[in-house]
Image: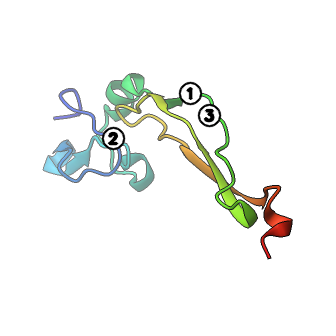
Amino acid sequence: GGCWHQCCPGRNNACWASGTHRARCYCDSYCERTGDCCEDYRAVCRHAAVGCAVGPWGPWSRCSSLCGVGSKARSRQVTVPPRHGGEPCPDLKQRRGCLGEHPTCGTAK
């Protein structure tokens, strides 16, 4: 047995093979944390790993509040999804505080 026929990303209990002494060994990327990978996991699965790639951040949105405390957001897209246990994607959205300072704010009272 071994991983020659399958490599799975993340934690997948259905991604296993018969190892030595008929014990189960795993071919999911989580097996590296738990130490129960099949003997050929690194040779078969790690070379096939593709890490996530993301594009540049987009522009910040306008402040959600015209007057006073609000928030802005921006995002980016995945250009290459992770495969075969490659590095997962980083955050795709960011949010930060802002202060709306529209010209009418002072006269709103």
Name the element at disc 2: loop
Q: Quadrant of residue 90?
A: top right
Label 1, secondary structure: give it: loop
Q: Position of residue 105 (x, y in %)?
A: 80, 64
State which quadrant residue 7 falls in.
top left
Which residue is located at x 31 percent, y 36 percent?
Answer: 39
Q: Residues within 10 Å of mark 1 (few under 14, many from 20)?
A: few
Task: Name, please, the residue furthest toward the right.
Answer: 106
Asked if labels 1 and 3 touch by Cβ distance under 8 angstroms, the answer is no
Mark 2–mark 1 distance (CA, rounded to whole Å): 22 Å
Residue 9's place in the image compared with 50, above or below, is: below
Instruction: Measure how far apart labels 3 and 1 are at the Cα level.
Output: 9 Å
Q: Which residue is mark 2?
A: 9
Residue receiving disc 3: 58
Q: Nearer the viewer, mark 3 or mark 2?
A: 3
Measure the alpha-carbon separation of dots 3 and 2. 28 Å
Disc assigned to residue 55? 1
Q: Nearer the viewer, mark 3 or mark 1?
A: 3
Q: Nearer the viewer, residue 62 or 103?
A: 103
Query: Of tags 2 and 1, which is closer to the observer?
Result: 1
Graded by Cα atoms within 10 Å as few (under 14), some (14 to 19) or many (20 or more), the crowding at tag 2 reads: some
Give the percent coordinates (x, y) of residue 36.
Answer: 33, 50
Identify the image quadrant of the N terminus. top left
Say which amino acid is labelled 2.
Pro
Where is residue 5? Give x, y as percent: 17, 28
Task: Say if residue 51 shows up in the picture.
Answer: no
Indicate the amino acid at tag 1.
Answer: Gly
Horizontal side of 51 relative to 70 (left or right) equals left
Compared across the picture, whether 68 is left or right of 74 comes to right
- SS type, badge 3: loop
Describe residue 80's horizontal placement relative to residue 26 as left or right.
right
Residue occupying image coordinates x 40% and y 51%: 35
